[in-house]
Image (cartoon, helix red, strand yellow):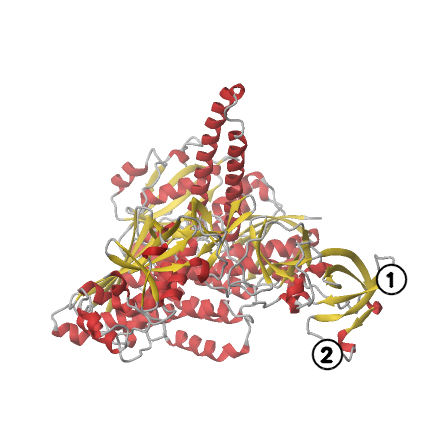
Amino acid sequence: MSDLRDNVQQEFLAEAQELVEALSRDLLLLDEAHQRAERPDASLINEIFRSVHTLKGIAGMFGYKHVGAIAHALEDLLDDLRLGRLDIGDPLLDVLFDSVERFQRLLSLEDPQSPEETPEVDAYVAIVRSIGNQPASDDGDPLHRYAIGSAVLSVLTEYEEHRLRACIREGMQLYRLRATFDLTAIDDSIEALRDVIRDDAEIITYLPSLEGGNDESIELVVLLASRVPESELKAHFEGQYGAVEAIEEQTHLPTIPPQLTSIPPGTQSLLPQPEEESGQASLRSVANSVRVDIRKLDDLMNVVGELALVRTAVGRAISGLDGDPKYKHSLRELDRLGRGFERQLAELRTRILDVRMVPLGQVFSKFARIVRQAAREHDKQVRLVVTGANTEVDKLIVEELADPLMHLVRNAIDHGIESVETRMRLAKPSEGTLALNAYHKGRNVVIEVEDDGGGMHAQKLRETAVSRGLLTAEASHDLTRQEMLNLVFLPGFSTNESVTDLSGRGVGMDVVKTNILRMGGVVSIASEQGIGTKITVTLPITLAIIRALIVKVGGRLFALPISAIREAVPFSQQDVRTIQGRKVITMRGETLPICDLTPWFGLREVEHQASRFVIVCEMGNRELGFVVDDLVGQEDVITKSLGQTLSSVRGFAGATDLGNQRLALVLDTPALFSEYFSSSEVQPSMEARA
Amino acid sequence: MTFHTLIVDDSSAVRAFVRAALEAEDFARVQEAETGFEALRLLATNAFDVVIVDVNMPDINGLELLAFIGKSPRQQGAIKILISTQADGPDAKRGVELGADAFLAKPFGVDDLRTLIQGLVHGRQEVSG
Amino acid sequence: MTAGAQRATLVPDPGSQDATIPVLAVAAGTELYGFPLSAVREILMPPPLTEVPRAANHFLGVIAVRGEIVTVVDLSELLRLEDRDRQPLGRVILVDVAEELIGVAVDRVVQVAQLQSDQIEYASAMSADLSEYVVGVARIPSESVATSEEMVILIDPRALLGGLT
């Protein structure tokens, strides 16, 4: 028994996690509808109910008793909601949003039965239960007025019956659509049908019928409710899908008409594919998907890497034959095949990277409840507007991005958006807007966190930086406004005196910036006083493969990510001057600090070659030249972790296999920058540039 | 006898649980369907000894599927078990009315399920959850 | 993989009838060291090493093993064996340590010895103050003609290699 549990435990955790994520996404949509004072979509509420319902069921089977208890309480509440016995309100939304975090925490517990959790879970359940139910108004059962047939009514679930009643009450007409579907393509056909129907009608249920089907096909009776006139519905569906027939509101006994419109099997899958629609539907998970451990994708990528190495080796072997007239024709053919192989390899790599892509909505959905909570704590009104939740980026980036984005969001509410009072005084809408926008731009993804709050006071930032000793008063005079704004990225900078609950967690903008730099991204600020602030994060779409410059230092090979490199220039020792203990050179009239990697890494100097190089790198608004012995060339590299044991060694992001069992360490440029610039007194970047 | 079993549930964890519970010691051979549609496909070409169906599924619900199985000539020998988290709701009652041999409330344990199937097979006695 | 590989130990299972423990004996400097065979994943002819600047002396560097990066430590350096000439790399044994695979560079691999638990003199029973990674000592048949038996120092790989920095 316990063995059995272990075996399927992973399955449980994966599904539970997915359910909670789906719940979180759907709650966001529910909240949006509520904020706009719209009546939420019945299918959305049902979806939320189903997530919680399924979670309750599986939690019980796998011994997650606290998760089960919370889900159980919520299920009752949601059941009332979907059956129309309860209205949506802020207290309800609050407990729902709260549940997401509780579920996540409880699912991560080592002991899912831990008695320590009991009091809190009990308290939460009590709160959920206290959100009482309002008795549903009963205006008599309208169902009996319709000739639906007891055979049909007897197979409806309680919820479907409720929807049927609700639709009738809303004055919708009931229809029966009969259609035959090819069994092998039924899911796609139904999906297509659903998309066509969506705007015209609500599907109550699908009833499989034994008539009109065989081993390859089946007839379904689709029960619909619609406001669209019968003639229009018929025009829409008849012929293409099957017969539409109105269910009359009458008193005499119903007879289900025997005539069937049979559609030849196989034709259903030719239905037009629905257009991709943004918003609600696309946020939902797609049925035709599999769950894959990301490590398996890494393994695949490794194989691609190995294949590329084989290709290089074959190329080398072929070039050994070069010049021999005997092989002239074969060589040309081999060359052609080699190029074809490379193309396919590139294609394979692209496809694998594609699989790693997940929508940014996964992180964004977490922010909805943060925004609600934060706004409430600060007595502010904040509306969250999300665009581009479907923008896809590498799974790893999504994970790494959660914390920095969270910080930016908290900052925007804490420091950006003003209190209701202040906003009224300034004749701004009392409700502030926090926008999260994501979109692709070339090979990058751009994420903006924008608020319509008070904006940043550039002069104040400058004063703060001086008072914190981050730069001298003299140096600060030459700063442009943009440079003043950029001061918030300096380590040790914090604009607000009071450490608040929200952003005062010891994580400043400098950490946000370092994290984003580490992913090969950049972050920039635009802010207008009184109007608002926009933080823009630009990231590469994928992390798995980076283009790197292979260099030689002290006789060893290192890879330097190309994203940080501005240029490489010949180095000559005579040009080096020393300013305040730092070695610098002058490039195009500007002073550039340099860091000779040989001594910096404690390596022995190799007999000095005549020509060494300076590689000018840029991180945010700092520049630094790394002095290396030689340039070997550019390559696409896959960075692999050095492992736990060597994780304390600074300056290396990992290692990469260059083939022929040659490894090169990949330099961690952001870490080297911060190490270099903090190695003695901090020089603000502006000085280095000036 | 190894029972040829179909589990229809949209939760992969439940399916994995049922599969693991029943396939141990060759008690049963389990096929899984995530949706009613998938189930229809399998029902068209297989004759099952045991069909376990979740009530609350999107699109085709468990009751509809149950009614369909009851009428399907190929599945006349099948033992029909309905599962749901709501043990005492109208759905359970409806299921039994529609010819379910048993109703099992989630969560259930490995032994519950195996005992139930064994009991139903040897004697087809009425069990109600 | 056997159950033993998941939790490598030199202490026999008391319930087990068959109390034989297979041990890989390796040479470093003048001493022999024994690793539980269940913790040894592979024995490699040393591939080219890539040094990691700034890492502690006992780290020889990293190697690529089928696409993975593996850290290699020098057993002699780690055990601070003195009076030892730096020898060319002999063999690298890949050892399972907690979550990580670590390469241990040794001079040569001597033999796999099947030790009975009563052949092992456990450190816990000795009065000498031994390092925590020493489980005990045992005698194994010698390869050399000069002596009939040799002493092997039994190592707990987790204690020796886990949490190394």
Give the distance between the C-alpha atoms of the residues marked 2 and 1, in whole angstroms.
Answer: 27 Å
Q: Is residue A619 left or right of residue C9?
A: left
Vertical order, A659 against A83 (above or below): above
Q: Residue at 43% x, 30% y: name it.
A: A264
Is disc 2 placed on a helix, strand or loop? loop
Q: Which residue is mark 1?
A: C147
- Residue A657: horizontal and vertical position, in percent? 52, 48
Residue A115 visible: yes
Q: Which residue is mark 2?
A: C129
Q: Residue at 41% x, 67% y: name it.
A: A100
Q: Quadrant of residue A177?
A: top left
Quarter of the N terminus of chain A within the rendering = bottom right
> Label 2: chain?
C
- Residue C50: horizontal and vertical position, in percent? 55, 53
Residue B96 visible: no
> Label 1: chain?
C
Is disc 1 placed on a helix, strand or loop? loop
Q: Is residue C143 left or right of residue A296?
A: right
Vertical order, B117 against A352 (above or below): below
Q: Amino acid at mark 1?
A: Thr
Q: Is residue A387 left or right of residue B42?
A: left
Q: Earlier in the sequence, mark 2 or mark 1?
A: 2
- Residue A281: horizontal and vertical position, in percent? 34, 51
Q: Amino acid at mark 2?
A: Asp
Q: Determine the residue located farthest toward the front in the rendered image.
A: A574
Q: Residue at 64% x, 51% y: name it.
A: C46
- Residue C122: horizontal and vertical position, in percent? 78, 73
